[in-house]
Amino acid sequence: MASDISPALARRSGPGRILIPVVLAIAALITLFPFYTMLIMSFKPVTDLSFPNALIPTGLTTEAYRTVLGGNDMIRWITNTLIYSLVSVVLVLLLASMAGYAFAKKRFPGRNAMFWSFLAMLMVPYHITLIPTFVILSHMDGVSTYWGLIVPTLANAQATFLMRQFIYGIPDSLLEAARMDGASDLRIFFQLILPLCRPILATLGLFVFLWHWNDFLWPLVIGQEPEMRTLTTGIAGLMRESTPLNVTLAGSVVALVPIFLAYILAQRHFTEGVAMTGVKG
Amino acid sequence: MTSLPTQVHVGPPPTEEEPAPAPARAPRGWWQQHGALAGIAFVLPMFALFVLFRFLPFLGGFGLAFANVDLGGEITFAGMANFQYMIHDQLFWKALTVTLLYSVIVVPLVIVVSIGLALLVRRGTRSMRIFRSVFFLPVITSLVLAGVVFIWIFGDGGPVPSLMSVFGLDTGSWLTNSALALPAVAIVAAWSRFGFDMLVVLARLNEIPRELEEAALVDGASAWQRFRHLTLPQLRSVVFFLAVIETITSFQVFDAIYIMTSGGPVNSTYTLGFMLYDQAFKFFNFGYSSAVSIVLFVIVLAFTLIQRFAFGRDDNG
């Protein structure tokens, strides 16, 4: 990071030199403690789940993982979550960049009214539309279906807004040149706009994925049948059914692994996402 | 629109002049105008989704608040009945109080922690960057998944009650204690949010001119004096921004409540966000649930408007 503090200020003296690392270390331990607990206890036998022994990494076994992955449920939840997340990411990115392109580079009647109504929806909390969306979906027979799970979440105002802002910055001269060469609108969009949007698509895609992977309330409401459960609603179900804690935690760890892997591989995009007004769902 | 902005930022709203390529020819109808049909074709899929799944449900929410929905899905007009019931519903006032109390705990907690840690990890050394990464981990973690382990951490005989008893406080499980369940959920929510706020504070800290602080350092100002008189005034707008964002977020809390307490014990964690789910999907009272959501919407909208007016379009103050 280029804009970090200068050496004059960085040179700490007195108590700060020891105190700051100690405070940070304590904060990091508190932050990491639940993850550590989750990991260790998921490898503990069911007979050894009480504090403090449960936190000591001895007598570890993969029993809980074999139980949770042995049944068909977990595989089903992983599949459902993957379908929900991946299909949503592809479609949100495609539809948001299409709309963003139209808002940024096209003139058509009603454009401003449409754009402002999109922006206004950013102020409407998700919860407010939850019940009516469910009622609409139940009239359309979308309850406990994949399309009912996915389609309503594609209407993403934040993604459309961010794509419009980015495409707005692409010079018109580039588009004009392509048009002179006889490129159609579809061609300009797919071969010029989308490749130029790659950095923002990566960041946005990661956040849309994260949001869907972690989403709980909508899958809970719309996935009434057990076979429509995602990882979050499935594990919440395990908890309610009083499954042994090590088995539930093993399920949680499995559900966390892809997110942590993505974080390790693409940390920069996560931090950039926060800078982009916080796409967090 | 000839200049090329070097970075994405919240740009100006669309104006009529903006995409300039229309060559000067005889006036034509809009449908013949360059790209108008293509523009509509490109925006239509997203716009249709919006109409169906955002605008319609939004209006529908207001409609349902004045209606009753029976189990067969039959919707009948009910006038103000839901709101009249709400005024006398002890559970609603309880939920409103719990939600306010929850916000009062979680908002200051998360802001103080994130400012403190942002100041400490401000230096860009390698170890500081590792700390930043660690503090961001809870942000990307689902509270449903983490909630499972927090139940154990705050539960009977778990680490937190055991630590308390070392200090002579016999709390037992926090989650079955009607005085401690809400603070427990608030702490968990703060754990999941502070890393995000810390990055927002860091971004602001990096904009503060170095010269000021260096001058103060040369003049012999102590760390506390520098923080109190130089840094803190500069952070005022970001603190306000975070307070609004965190208040809005905390008013809608659901995941952590559902997993950790389900509103209990004795409704001590029964928030508005949980209430609207509970009324709709446990009691199938869709009309009443929508009325509760309207109240939630008005509160959230008030805070959003405060933020918009205070900052214009510059969200980061």
Image (cartoon, coloured by chain):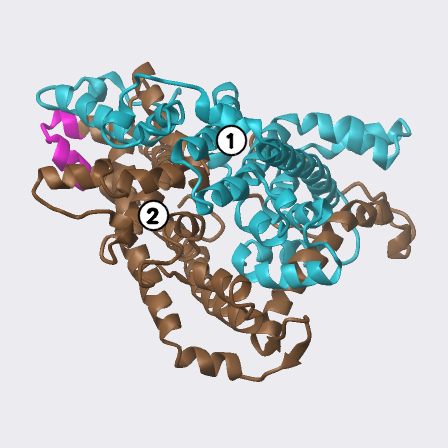
Name, please, the residue furthest toward the front: A47
Is residue A232 visible in this depiction of the protein?
A: yes
Provide the chain ID for the residue under circle 1.
A
Q: Residues within 10 Å of mark 2 (few under 14, many from 20)?
A: some
Whether B311 is drawn above or below A227: the answer is below
Which one of the lettered chains is coloured brown?
A: B
Q: Identify the mark at residue A255; answer none if there is no mark.
A: 1
The secondary element bearing badge 2 is classed as helix
Is residue B236 visible in this depiction of the protein?
A: no
Discs 2 and 1 share one subunit:
no
Residue placed most toward the observer, A196 or B252 = B252
Image point 53% across, 50% down: which residue?
Answer: A217
Q: Which residues are magenta?
A: B216-228
Q: Quadrant of residue A89?
A: top right
Q: Position of residue B71 (x, y in %)?
A: 63, 71
Q: Identify the mark at residue B237; answer none if there is no mark.
A: 2
Q: Nearer the viewer, mark 2 or mark 1?
A: 1
Q: Identify the mark at residue A163; answer none if there is no mark.
A: none
Q: Position of residue A51 (x, y in %)?
A: 24, 32
Residue placed most toward the observer, B108 or B173 = B173
Q: How many marks?
A: 2
Q: Position of residue B79 (x, y in %)?
A: 57, 84
